[in-house]
Image (cartoon, rainbow, N blue to C red):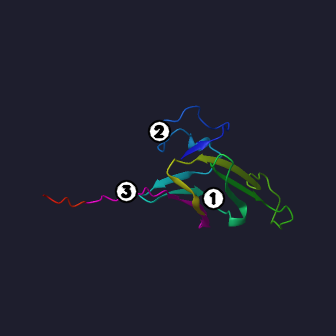
Amino acid sequence: MLPARHNNWMPDIFNDFFDNNWMDRPKATAPAINVIETPDAYELELAAPGMTREDFHVHLDEEGDLVINMEKKMDNKEQHKGHYLRREFSYTKFQQTMLLPEDANREAIAARVENGVLTVNIAKIKKVEPEKVRKQIEVQ
């Protein structure tokens, strides 16, 4: 899976299909994303501390790419012990589009949020190999 859509923090060229080390994390505003491949599926983990399932919208776009939208707004009516001298976490918005591999089953995608991590499971298309037919040949 490759991130798609050009944001200002995205590189121009990717090094490998999955193993990219291109984003300078200390200056990044995007959540950390892990991609794990198993024989049967791909699993995407997105760090989302403090987010709930209502804060996410995960869907496939018209090209069949995986789109993750995350948005969290804090209510300004909340009671506080004092006034903020600096406030940087009152609004969070993020969108990431991932190009899915050819063997991704776009009909079998599931997402869940648990312990501050969004996990998206994408099943792989199972390749059915033709049965090897043994034919007995009669010797005459």
| Crowd class of label 3 (few under 14; some 14 to 19; many from 20; radius 10 Å) | few
User: What is the three-letter code of the residue carrying label 1?
Assistant: Ala
Q: Nearer the viewer, residue 105 or 58?
A: 105
| Crowd class of label 2 (few under 14; some 14 to 19; many from 20; radius 10 Å) | few
Q: Taking the image as drawn, is residue 119 in sight?
A: no
- The boundaries of the magenta stretch are 111-134
Which type of secondary structure does the marked residue at label 3 adopt? loop
Q: Nearer the viewer, residue 27 or 96?
A: 96
Q: Residue at x 77, y 53 (%)?
A: 87
Which type of secondary structure does the marked residue at label 1 adopt? loop
Q: Position of residue 133 (x, y in %)?
A: 29, 59
Separation (CA) of disc 3 from disc 2:
32 Å
The circle drawn on residue 130 is 3
User: What is the three-letter code of the residue carrying label 3?
Assistant: Pro
Q: Residue at x 49, y 51 (%)?
A: 103
Q: Taking the image as drawn, is residue 12 in sight?
A: yes
User: What is the three-letter code of the residue carrying label 2?
Assistant: Asp
Q: Position of residue 136 (x, y in %)?
A: 21, 61
- Mark closer to the chain start, 1 or 3: 1
The circle drawn on residue 48 is 1
Separation (CA) of disc 1 from disc 3:
43 Å
* Residue to which mark 2 is pinned: 16
